[in-house]
Amino acid sequence: MPERFALIIPALNEEAVIGLTLDSLRGVPLDQLIVVDNGSTDQTAEVARAHGAQVVSEPRRGYGSACLAGMAALGPEITVVAFMDGDGSDDPADLQRLLTPIVSGEADMVLGSRVMGTRETGALTPQQRFGNALATSLLRIFHGARYSDLGPFRAIRRDALERLQMRDRNYGWTIEMQIKAARHKLRVQEIPVSYRRRRAGKSKISGTLRGTFSAGWKIIWTIFRYSLQAKA
């Protein structure tokens, strides 16, 4: 039975760049392309629809909320799910490389590592680099999970994703997935990916002090929360 691929792209006020992002995916073998409009106040949904995406509305703000809404919209035939940001920072040319180890049966989940890959100057801010290094160190100490990055560009088998029973509705989504993948003993690979400065607009996390602090706090809290659950 052939694999069927879906890509979920959460998007909040990405009108200026979502069309370019979707156009750059032409030629990638996707069976379902979902853009989740996460309460945008601009024309993100309209632009995404005009560029061929299935648009799902999730007015409740939060990266995890958008990802969960995208998952709920998956067709029954989909066997592999990928997640990618809509701001043009991820290179769609890397998507096939994320999918290949899953298709070949070598991995259940593949993470795109910005740390292992090439980055445009300024693509990762100093606070992002520090926070990423701290979080991955804490993951290793408290969960025995060795990752180099928490980047959102990733692919996972649908049945494995469903076993993880994802819950987080905002900044803890990626770290929750990686903690639960380790707990469920999924076969996880990291591959180097290219990472670029966003093509337009402003980051909702690293672009503001409040966003940076909120994301960092939630990630660290999620690591400790799951560590306490494991000991309970």
Image (spheres, rainbow, N blue to C red):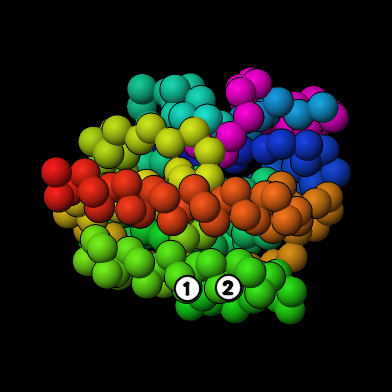
User: Which residue is label 2 attached to?
Assistant: 129
Around disc 1, counting alpha carbons within 10 Å, would you say few (fewer than 14), some (14 to 19), or many (20 or more)? some
Q: Quick one: SS at disc 1?
A: helix
Q: Is residue 115 left or right of residue 140?
A: right
Residue under the image location 68 percent in, 70 percent down: 125
Q: CA distance from mark 1 to mark 2?
A: 6 Å
- The spot of residue 31 in percent (x, y) is 49, 35
Question: Does the rendering let one see residue 72?
Answer: yes
Q: Is residue 52 magenta?
A: yes
Looking at the picture, how far across and down is residue 39, in whole percent? Answer: 71, 26
Count of numbered labels shown in the rendering: 2
Q: Quadrant of residue 185?
A: bottom left
**Residue at 41% in and 72% down:** 148
Please tell me whether residue 52 is drawn above or below residue 19 in the rendered image. Answer: above
Please rate how many residues cluster around mark 2, counting C-alpha atoms within 10 Å: few if below 14, some from 14 to 19, many from 20: few
Residue 133 marker: 1
Magenta residues (range): 42-64
**Nearest the camera: 107 or 13?**
13
Residue positioned 27% across, 69% down in the render: 141
Element carrying mark 2:
helix
User: Can residue 31 be seen in this snapshot?
Assistant: no
Q: Amino acid at mark 2?
A: Arg
Three-letter amino acid code of the residue under disc 1? Ala
Q: Is residue 2 above or below residue 98?
A: above
Q: Is residue 170 above or below residue 186?
A: above
Asked if the residue under mark 2 is in contact with the one under mark 1, i.e. CB atoms within 8 Å, the reply is: yes
Give the position of the C terminus as an image quadrant. Answer: top left
- Image location (x, y in percent) of residue 60: 61, 23
